[in-house]
Image: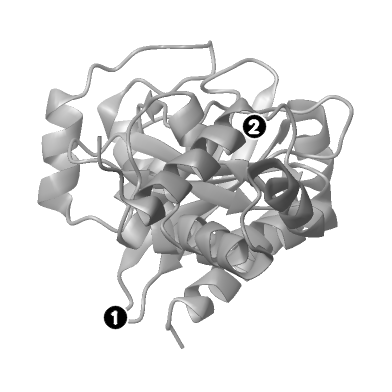
Amino acid sequence: MNEVKSAVRVLEVLELLAQAEKPLALKEVVDELGYPKSSTHNLLATLVARGYAVRGEAERYTLNEAYRNGPGWICGPEARLIELAGPVMRALRDGCGETIMLGVLNNDCRLKTLERCSGTQPVRYESPLGSCLPSYCTAMGRALLAARDDGQIEHYLAHERIVQYTRHTLVERDLIRQHIAKARLDGFAVSDQEMDIGGSGVAAPVLNAKGETVAALNVAAISSRFAERRQDFIAAVKGHALLLSNRLGWH
């Protein structure tokens, strides 16, 4: 069987990252695979740029959890978005101590979580990567719906199954519309225990160079801390969403 050496090396790096129980440093990858340091660094950089791998703290690499958990491939603009968002998400996490998430809407206007930066608090709130969540009752979903035109919002609400996940979930479509409209005016959206009791979040839109909303950045916290630091979290997520927007070319 004829194998292409460059393709084999890419696959072996991916397989190594998939099997690793913890993030790996460049030296560990080099030692394990026996590749030259410079070419190994280039391979890892390419995988990070394409969204297949993540470069974390202390320059350690890990497989993107989206692939490990199997929700589908991430490529093109989404991979670039994840790469640029990483440092911003870590800075936001370090500043507030809570879990940070990055999300987009799929073709059905449901929420897809692209990336997550786990909080440093012993007790924290998280949501799985790649999950296809309803947008009407999530902070990121509302922030993203707020950028859509009224026709798209109405189409989504007409086809989405409205479920009361908790006693706090908004299920009346008129109230949902009001919260989406408020998010459009405020520049952020809040979901307070609407998906899970004890979990709350605030999200702000991320814009590209054309001023189009392409993603949402979210601070997720247990509800008691969210209530205490609500205004701090709002200011932080808006500021870091603007920072990420600037990295995408918005000024």
Crowd rating for badge 2 (residues with CA inside 10 Å; few <14, some 14–19, many 20+): many
Q: Where is residue 70 in the image (x, y as percent from the top left)?
A: 40, 24
Q: Which picture quadrant has residue 21?
A: top right
Select label 2 or label 1 by which is in front. 1
Which amino acid type corresponds to the residue marked 2 in the rendered image? Ser
Q: Tell me, yes or no, if residue 181 can be seen here.
A: no
Which amino acid type corresponds to the residue marked 1 in the rendered image? Lys
Secondary structure type for disc 1: loop
Residue 24 versus residue 167: which sits nearer the camera? Answer: 24
Residue at 45% over, 38% down: 113
**Residue carrying label 2:** 200
Q: Position of residue 67 (x, y in %)?
A: 44, 32
Residue 215 versus residue 79: which sits nearer the camera? Answer: 79
Q: Tell me, yes or no, if residue 210 can be seen here.
A: yes
Q: Which picture quadrant has residue 80?
A: bottom left
Residue at 10% over, 49% down: 151
Residue at 77% over, 37% down: 227
**Residue carrying label 1:** 210
